Amino acid sequence: MDIPPTLDASISTAHTVKSVLLLVNPISGKGDTRSKRKNLVRFIECCAANGITVTRVDTSRANHCYETLLTYPLELVDCVCVAGGDGTYRESVAGMLARTDKLVVPITVLPLGSGNNLARDCGINSYKDTLAKLREGRRKRVDALQVAHRDGTDVSVNVVTWGIGLAVGKTAETRLRWLGPLKYDVATLWHILWNLKRRARLFPRVDGKGNQVDMDFHLMLAQNTRRMGNGYLSCPSSQLDDGKMDLAVIPHLPRLSMLKLFMQLKGDGAHVLDKRVQYIQVDQLNLETEESEEVNIDGDRMVWTPITIDVLPNSWEVLV
Ligand SMILES: [Mg+2]
C-alpha cells in the first residue's frame, strides 16, 4: 500500500549523505526472514552503488541501539539508518536524545519491523524509499514524546497505549506473533469479546489548561504518528511536527459498539468521528489508575502508571 508522508518536505534543510551508520535489528518483525535479509543486502549494495559508505552494527540485545547512539562518534556519519520497526526506531531516538554532547544527525529507517508506522508517516515503505531519502538528503526536525512513569522516563516516537490497545499489543506480540500480520486482528477480536472495564483518571492539557476525567475506559492512545499496530489509522490527523500529541480516548462501550469502532479503525480511521470517541490534540497528559497498571510504548516497551506525557517539540531529525 502506498501511503503518503505527513511531513511538508518543502520545509527542510539540504544535507549531503555520504556516510551512514546502519543499525540492524535482526529479530524485528517476524524474525530473520529471507525477504528481510534480501532487502537488507540490496539496500547495502544500492548504497555502495550510490557512493554512500555504510558502517553496519547488528544489535544483539535490548537497548543495544540506545547504547550505541548514546556514545557513537556521530561526527563520523551524515545519517543514522535503523533497520527494524517502531521499537528499534524508538530506542535509537532515545539514545540520540540522551547524548551529553547534544549532537543530532538525521535518523531514517529501513522498514523491517511488523508495524513500521513511523516509517509510513515519513513516506518510507521499502528499501528503495529509504535509498531515495538518503540520495535526496532533506533533513527535517520532528517531535518526540517523553513519558515520565513510576520508574523513570522513556521516549516514544509512535504510540503510548493503555487499555484494550495495550492488551491487544501484548497478546499479539507474545502469543500470536506466529500469525504475522493477522496477529493484531485476532488479538483485538479476543479482547473486544472479553470487554473488560478499566477505571482511570485522565488529565489532558494544552498550555497547562484542561479538564480531568474520571471514568471507565476501553482505550487511550497518545501518539505522534497516524498509525499504530499493523498500520491501523488510529489518529488520522496526527502530524510529526505540530508540537502536539494526538489523544484518542474510547470510554467503556458495549461489545457491538466496540466491534464497529474497530472496523472503522481498521478501515479509514472514521472511529474518530464517533461522538463517543474523544479525539483531541494536546501537549501534556496525565494518566492515573487506582492500582499501578501497564502502559505500552511503541509496541515493545512496558512501563507502569501513573504516567505524564510531554511533547518534546523539534527534538530530533528525519529525512523527508
Ligand atoms: Mg504531533
Image (tube, rainbow, N blue to C red):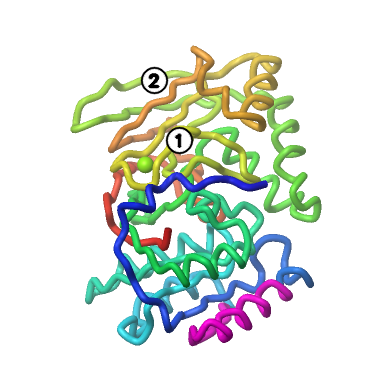
Residue 191 percent coordinates (x, y): 69, 31
Position above or below: 78 against 122: below
Magenta stretch containing residue 10, yes or no?
Answer: no
Instruction: Give the residue at x 36% y 20%.
Output: 213
Q: Is residue 43 magenta?
A: yes
Question: Quadrant of the rendered structure where residue 112 is?
Answer: bottom right
What separation in Å lies between label 2 and label 1 (alpha carbons)?
14 Å
Residue at the spot 71% in from the left edge and 27% down from the top edge: 194
Q: Is residue 100 above or below residue 265?
A: below
What residue would you read off at disc 1?
291
In the rendered structure, the answer to whether residue 298 lies left or right of residue 316 reads right
Q: Is mark 1 within 8 Å of ligand 1?
A: no
Q: Nearer the viewer, residue 263 or 120?
A: 120
Whether residue 89 is visible here, answered yes or no, is yes
User: x, y (%) of residue 313?
Assistant: 27, 49
- Relative image position of residue 15 (x, y in whole percent): 34, 71
The residue range painted magenta reads 37-59
Question: x, y (%) of residue 65?
Answer: 47, 73
The label on residue 51 is: none
**Dot 2: element:** strand
Give the residue number, with chain letter if any, for mark 2: 214
Whether residue 297 is visible: no
Q: Amino acid at mark 2?
A: Asp
Residue at 63 percent across and 22 percent down: it is 261
Query: Which amino acid is tagged 1?
Result: Glu
